[in-house]
Amino acid sequence: MKSAREIEIMRRSGKITSSVLAMLLQTAKAGMTLGELDRLAEKGIRDRGGIPTFKGYQGYPNSICASVNEVVVHGIPGNQVLKDGDILSIDIGTTFERYVSDTAATVAIGNVSVEAARLMRVTQECLMIGIGKMQKGNRLSDIGHAVQAHAESHGYGVVRALVGHGVGTKMHEEPQVPNWGEAGRGIVMRPGLVLAIEPMITGGTHDVATMADGWTVVTADGKLAAHFEHTIALTDDGPRILTLRENDFLELDVAPYRPKEEIAA
Ligand code: MF3
Ligand code: CO
Ligand code: CO
């Protein structure tokens, strides 16, 4: 549980992370390398007074994870050049006054297939629907149950090997937040809970494999994957997204949760 004071620091941390992610999502274009995006991310975080949480985390070499097409998460930015039709998932974290914020989004590079666009949209809907279940009195597994139902209703796979998590002075805190399972299990959620909810959704099987670099997670069948993540505090007034971006979610219309009014100035 976090105090109001801690959540205020996390909000400021989240503002840094979300504004840098928004910049990266706008900047990513065909012809750029993932390494260039990583350098922009590190500069963006440091210029805003934060520290890139990922850099050095369990030996991770960079400030973002950049995961293209069949890469689900934890792609290491390097010389790979983005090309028209790719989908790119960017995951980014900031530590500010000791508190971590963690957020991710998948973006189209140029013109992507209808199928890729649909996968991205449904994955973002999964995140929004999961956030909508983060209400006082609900059980933790209500989140994953709702995410799984939405993804599978579209014929998609829900990655099992990686989960969302509590977040605070450490990036990964208790509890784990799976994106699947039965409803009505786990802790009863109360104000002060801060979670990173992060559905990883695939166009085919939910099985994944890790590459020889020890980080890069790919779909086992080589089909596309998408990933959206927010850091959210449960308040007396419901879930408050600490990493909300300008225009976040605005194109979606299926979800029960409309966070527009929370966009910080
Ligand atoms: N941010 C990722 C997550 O969503 C973890 C990244 S691991 C790192 O939980 F090593 F890249 F930092
Ligand atoms: Co993340
Ligand atoms: Co996370």
Image (spheres, rainbow, N blue to C red):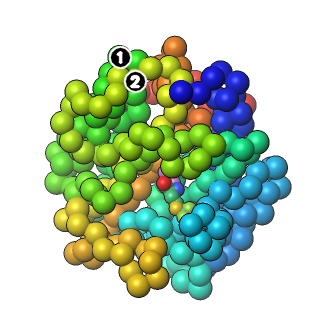
Please state if 159 lies on the left or on the right of 42 as rendered.
left
Front residue of 253/40: it is: 40
Residue carrying label 1: 137
* Residue drawn at the location 22% of the way across and 75% of the way down: 221
Which residue is the extreme one toward the top? 236
Secondary structure of the residue carrying numbered label 2: loop
Mark found first going from the N terminus, 2 or 1? 1
Front residue of 90/138: it is: 138
Tell me where residue 122 appears, x and y as whole percent.
32, 48
Within-10-Å neighbours for mark 2: few <14, some 14–19, many 20+: some
Within-10-Å neighbours for mark 1: few <14, some 14–19, many 20+: few
The amino acid marked with disc number 2 is Met
Q: Is residue 230 visible?
A: no
Relative to residue 50, is residue 236 depicted above or below? above
Residues at discs 2 and 1 in contact (Cβ within 8 Å): yes
Residue carrying label 2: 189
Q: Which mark is residue 34?
A: none
* Residue drawn at the location 37% of the way across and 42% of the way down: 177
* Residue drawn at the location 59% of the way across and 47% of the way down: 170
Tell me where residue 73 appears, x and y as whole percent.
43, 65
Tell me where residue 88 appears, x and y as whole percent.
48, 66
Q: Disc 2 and disc 1: Cα gap in Å? A: 6 Å
Relative to residue 170, is residue 9 depicted above or below? above
Front residue of 181/151: it is: 181
Tell me where residue 11 appears, x and y as whole percent.
66, 34
Residue 61 in which image quadrant: bottom right
Query: On the rendered image, what quadrant is the C terminus found in?
Result: top right
Front residue of 81/114: it is: 81
Secondary structure of the residue carrying numbered label 1: loop
The amino acid marked with disc number 1 is Gly
Number of marks in the rendered image: 2
